[in-house]
Image (cartoon, rainbow, N blue to C red):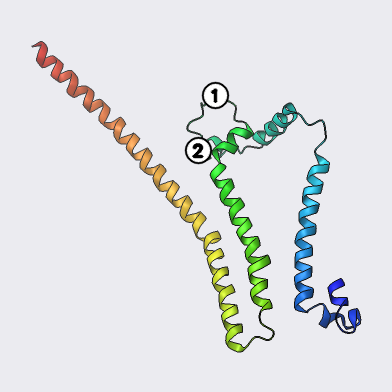
Amino acid sequence: MIMAATYENGLANFYVNTAQDFSLLAATISGIVVSTIATIGVSLCTISSNWTDEKSKLEWAKTINIDNPLSPFRLVYEEELAEIEVGSFITSSTMGKIFRKARLVAIVGGALSLILFLVIFPAVALNFDILTFEQFSSWLKTFQIYCFVCTFAVVVVPPFEEGYQIWTRYQQIKAIRRKKKLEPLMNRTISYQEEELVC
């Protein structure tokens, strides 16, 4: 609103001035900044000053209690939790160590997206006063390609990953069953060889 007020006729020409490039840019940046500050502020205000390790462990225990009995997280994250003993209590610091790589990927991906949308795209758009038809078409194609890649990542990759996990689990179960079927045959062969040696 402040940026729109700086144009000719100010807020009297509301629809035109609020749709200007710098007005929209100022609105987008202020929205992101305010929401970020509000999120951090609320988080800091809701954490009491006498927060202890015992309280954090209690909150973590509440999170563990929400676990789905049909699909417990011990089975969902079986590969990731393989190094941890079955009876041991899993803490938030343990999960932080296990999923450190995924956390870093999320942070880097989020930072790159922010830079892309807050710096690169607006900087490219501000270089052009009035876009020609070819420039506008290439601008739209860029966004369409980006949206297609993001949609592909969100829609196609998770089911493919699930399918791959199901397939690898099936192969593991198949190998275990084959091993169980071969064990009696191996025992018979060994016992037969022992009988021959005795005779």
Please rate how many residues cluster around mark 2, counting C-alpha atoms within 10 Å: few if below 14, some from 14 to 19, many from 20.
Answer: few
* 173 in relation to 126, above or below: above
Residue furthest toward the bottom?
133
Q: CA distance from mark 1 to mark 2?
A: 16 Å
Of residue 16 and residue 57, the one placed in the foreground of this image is: 16
Q: Amino acid at mark 2?
A: Glu
Q: Earlier in the sequence, mark 1 or mark 2?
A: 2
Where residue 114 appears, as percent x and y from the top left, is 66, 61
Where residue 81 appears, as percent x and y from the top left, is 51, 34
What secondary structure is marked by label 1?
Answer: loop
Evaluate whether residue 95 shows in this view: yes
What secondary structure is marked by label 2?
Answer: loop
Give residue 3's quadrant in the image: bottom right
Q: Is residue 157 left or right of residue 173?
A: right
| Residue mark closest to the camera, 1 vs 2 | 2
Please rate how many residues cluster around mark 1, counting C-alpha atoms within 10 Å: few if below 14, some from 14 to 19, many from 20.
Answer: few
* 88 in relation to 100, above or below: above
Quarter of the N terminus within the rendering: bottom right
Q: Which residue is mark 1?
A: 87
* 65 in relation to 88, above or below: below
Q: Is residue 158 left or right of residue 9?
A: left
Assess whether mark 2 and mark 1 are in contact (beta carbons under 8 angstroms). no
Q: Residue at x 37, y 39 (%)?
A: 172
Q: Amino acid at mark 1?
A: Gly
Where residue 50 appears, as percent x and y from the top left, is 82, 30
Q: Which residue is mark 2?
A: 80
Q: Residue at x 82, y 41 (%)?
A: 46
Where residue 128 appears, as percent x and y from the top left, is 66, 82
